[in-house]
Amino acid sequence: MTHTTTIAAKRGGLALAKKAAAAGAVALAVASLQPVSAAHAADARVIGGKPAAQNEFPFMVHLSMGCGGALYKKDIVLTAAHCMDGSGNNTRITVTAGVADLNSAGAIKVKSTKVKVAPGYDGVGKDWALIKLAKPIDRPTLKIATTTKYNRGTFTIAGWGDVREGAGTGTTKLQKADVPFVSDRACKWHYGNRLVPKQELCAGYASGGIDTCQGDSGGPMFRKDDAGKWIQVGIVSWGDGCARSGVPGVYTEVSTFAKDIAKAASTL
Ligand code: 4AZ
């Protein structure tokens, strides 16, 4: 556990460092100096969430490097590129499915065989990747949004990541929370040109308090479609800290990449 957590922390730090580097040294200084409000620092709980019930989000998977993911097909996981080491044969990832509590009996553990990172991924935008599994997992899949119509409203986030900013440990019990859509315009009030609006989607409360955090990366952000079925609209990607007021979480805009994801899956 300590080992995987350390790797996850490195990955999260790397992703954030790349973002900051892309935005320049001034942005890095501002981001690192931004305080966490006392009220939010004291929040224990994804941040500000509550435990998910067993089977509530049966498509959710945990990855051994300390990221989340969702079953796109029974033998393919959709996650974040920044959680991966690159494309190619990869038998190092253990995917855990079928449980909200990672320590409970009944956890399904399957190894990866291959990884496909988004073509052209360079640390800015395009933060998606697929993992091919050694065998199919007999759990429901999560369909992905193929149009922009669901990029609005209230989204559900879930993950085993940190329940407070800076913890670096994650949690063994899956946490869930709801967060509202934030427009690109409003999201740019904080992130400016670090946001890639066509490739990224923001969510969160202006007052903060509820957000994804380190260790939730790669997991899905989802909502109900018009037929009442869960549909994935985002992938946990990055943010300045977690649950800070005025600082939304940034998610890969799944609908933008739906065709690329389907094409990549067909090659795995
Ligand atoms: C991370 O380090 C991370 N508040 C993920 C999500 C967010 C921030 C950081 C969004 O993996």
Image (tube, rainbow, N blue to C red):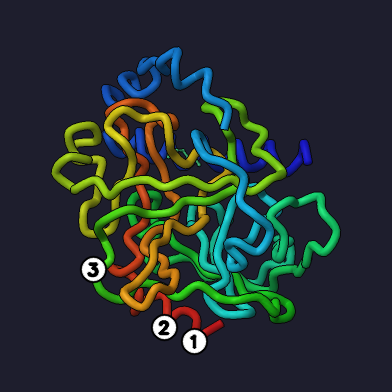
> In the image, residue 145 lies at what x, y percent?
35, 72
The residue under the point 57% across, 49% down is: 159
> In the image, residue 176 lies at what x, y percent?
53, 47
The residue under the point 43% across, 38% down is: 211
> Are the two marked residues, 2 and 1, in contact with CB atoms closer than 8 angstroms?
yes
Q: Which residue position holds label 1?
A: 266
Q: Which residue position holds label 2?
A: 263
Rounded to the nearest whole Å, what is the CA distance between mark 3 and mark 2? 19 Å
Q: As drawn, is 127 to the left or to the right of 13?
A: left
**Residue 245 placement: quadrant:** top left
The residue under the point 55% across, 65% down is: 70
Q: Nearer the viewer, residue 264 or 206?
A: 206
Q: Nearer the viewer, residue 165 or 122?
A: 165
Q: Is residue 106 above or below residue 237?
A: below
Q: Secondary structure at mark 1?
A: helix
Rounded to the nearest whole Å, what is the CA distance between mark 3 and mark 1? 23 Å
The residue under the point 58% across, 62% down is: 57
User: Residue placed farthest to the right in the image?
Assistant: 105
User: Residue placed farthest to the left in the image?
Assistant: 185
Query: Amino acid type of disc 3?
Result: Thr
> Are the two marked residues, 3 and 2, in contact with CB atoms closer than 8 angstroms?
no
Q: Nearer the viewer, residue 63 or 127?
A: 63
Q: Earlier in the sequence, mark 3 or mark 1?
A: 3
Q: Residues within 10 Å of mark 1 (few under 14, many from 20)?
A: few
**Residue 204 placement: quadrant:** top left
User: Residue placed farthest to the bottom in the image?
Assistant: 266
Query: Amino acid type of disc 2?
Result: Lys
**Residue 107 placement: quadrant:** bottom right
Rounded to the nearest whole Å, what is the CA distance between mark 2 and mark 1? 5 Å
> In the image, residue 131 lies at what x, y percent?
59, 69
Q: Which residue position holds label 3?
A: 148
